[in-house]
């Protein structure tokens, strides 16, 4: 396996992880939206889901910034 193959494999893995995080983020958004409409919603559960969603957003942004080449380089 060449260095280029390793780079391509790592890049593919990161892109795949980014897709997975985006899907989970979108799914959480749907769940939060539905739960927010329920007058008997468990507020603690809702807060935990929102916190998880924010954490996912941070991970997505970090991964995206790693995948975007540095323009100053």
Image (tube, helix red, strand yellow):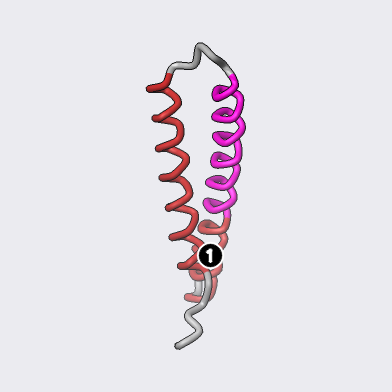
Can you say whether 5 is above or below 55 in the image? Answer: below
Which residue is nearer to you in this view: 14 or 46?
A: 46
Q: Which residue is mark 1?
A: 11
Residue shown at 43% from the left, 60% from the top: 62
Q: Write down the quadrant of residue 45 in the picture.
A: top left
Q: Residue furthest bottom?
A: 73
Residue shown at 46% from the left, 67% from the top: 66
Can you say whether 53 is above or below 11 in the image? Answer: above
Q: Residue furthest top?
A: 40
In the shown orientation, is residue 23 left or right of residue 54? right
Residue shown at 59% from the left, 50% from the top: 19
Verify whether residue 5 appears in magenta: no
Number of marks drawn: 1
Measuring from the top left, give residue 34's x and y in whole percent.
61, 24
Q: Residues within 10 Å of mark 1 (few under 14, many from 20)?
A: few
Measuring from the top left, give residue 28's x and y in whole percent.
55, 34
The secondary structure type at the circle numbered 1 is helix
Which residue is nearer to you in this view: 33 or 66?
A: 33
Secondary structure mostly taken by the magenta-highlighted segment of the chain: helix
Measuring from the top left, give residue 53's x and y in whole percent.
47, 40
Q: Write down the quadrant of residue 30 in the picture.
A: top right
Verify whether residue 21 appears in magenta: yes
Which residue is nearer to you in this view: 44 or 65?
A: 44
Q: Write the start and end of the magenta stretch as one range.
A: 16-37
Residue shown at 42% from the left, 21% from the top: 43
Can you say whether 46 is above or below 52 in the image? Answer: above
Q: Residue furthest front?
A: 39
Measuring from the top left, give residue 20's x and y in whole percent.
56, 45
The quarter of the picture where the C terminus appears is bottom left
């Amino acid at each position: 396996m060449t260095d280029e193959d390793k780079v391509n494999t790592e890049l593919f893995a990161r892109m795949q992880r980014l897709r997975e995080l985006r899907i989970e983020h979108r799914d959480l958004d749907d769940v939060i939206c539905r739960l927010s409409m329920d007058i008997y919603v468990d507020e603690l559960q809702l807060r935990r889901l929102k916190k998880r969603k924010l954490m996912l957003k941070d991970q997505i942004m970090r991964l995206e910034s790693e995948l975007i080449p540095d323009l100053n380089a």
